[in-house]
Amino acid sequence: MELAVFEKINSLDKLQSLSKHEKIVQGILDAINNDELQLNDPLPSVNKMIGGLGFARETIVRAYKDLIERGIIASKNRKGYFVINGNIRQQQKIAMVLYAFDTFQEALFKSFKAVVGEEVQIDLFFHHNNSDVFEAIFNQIAGNYSLYIVAPIANDRIEKLLLNIPVFKLLIIDRYIHLSDDHSYVVQEFEKPAYEIFQKLKDKFSKYEEIVFFFRENTAEPNEIVNAFNRFLKDSGLKGRIESSYKVGSIEKNKVYFTIHNPELYSILKDVMKNDWELGKDLAVLSHNDDIVKEIISGGITTFSTDFVRMGEIAANYAIERNKVQQVLPTELFLRQSL
């Protein structure tokens, strides 16, 4: 048992950003989670930890005190330290910081919660791509959670904040930013997949007079998709333009309308119904980020999307096992009646 504890702690040496205190805490939690330490098993004495690790006494005592406060171990009548709670999940308190609670983010959250279980506390926060809001959330939650799952905003200000969180307590989700080679992430990509999707749809696009892409700048909508769209228009020779928003009643036949913003999609579909036009014939619609609603409405909306359910499952496995994960999920095309 003692050997397993030392092995788990030493295995964290590759994570340079972890303090010695954090390595001890996480190593013991990992040993418990892998059943190498079980209920009532003794931990190495402070002196043995000093001899085995070479850490200062104060560092080891502080790590044991941290585990005592979490209800994981206890000190029994000067006999040493013992495991008193083998349910690591019960001690989990997770902060999940997302852009907004859209239907696809809801799918992510539900799949995450289904895997980690009801006993884990998950607090949701939304920054709406606003750095001031993000910083206010960060100041509120910093130091209060065992894990932070964060959809980041890509700027220096936010990156500096996130670097204050220990590596093993942070999972980057949805949007990738590079913090270090040690940080875990499960994200989607935008520019390359979007361009490839546009190329796949070239023949369908060419049946219509023009592609109109509604894109809201300075929002959570990815600029990389704009880059992909402009490059596709240049390479394909097809006619297209970018507008900041859809104006109700402005819909025209023989156009392809592409939007990322769901309320805008519903306004377009409402106007299609008012005119008694047929999607996929009189005009076409393309949307980003798939969900069950888009499978059903108006005979089905063509979308391209990553798998947010899978993203939630991978994030949940990280929360449980804390094994380093660095994964970019693929983007898929879902062809339906609207295009």
Image (cartoon, rainbow, N blue to C red):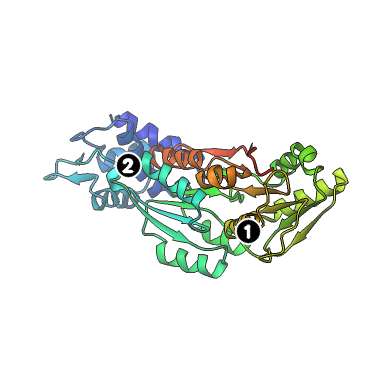
Residue at numbered disc 1? 274
Q: Can you tell which quarter of the image residue 272 is in?
A: bottom right
Residue 183, visible in the rendered structure:
no
What kind of residue is marked 1?
Lys
- Mark toward the viewer: 2 or 1: 1
Residue 129 higher or lower than 174, as above or below: below
Q: Residue 4 at what x, y percent from top left?
A: 33, 30
> Which of the pair 160/266 is nearer the observer?
266
- In this rendering, would 12 be left or right of 182? left
Q: Residue 311 at what x, y percent from top left?
A: 50, 41
Residue 312 higher or lower than 136, as above or below: above
Q: Can you tell which quarter of the image residue 337 is in?
A: top right
The 10 Å Cα crowd at callout 1, few under 14, some 14 to 19, many 20 or more, is: few
> Which of the pair 275/234 is nearer the observer?
275
Q: Residue 211 at what x, y percent from top left?
A: 77, 52
Mark 2 or mark 1, which has the lower sequence index? 2
Residue 7, visible in the rendered structure:
yes
Please tell me which residue is depicted at 53% across the width and 53% down the height of the picture.
151
- In this rendering, would 150 be left or right of 59? right
Please tell me which residue is depicted at 71% across the width and 59% down the height of the picture.
251
Residue at numbered disc 2? 117
Q: Residue 338 at what x, y percent from top left?
A: 66, 44
> Which of the pair 65/248 is nearer the observer?
248
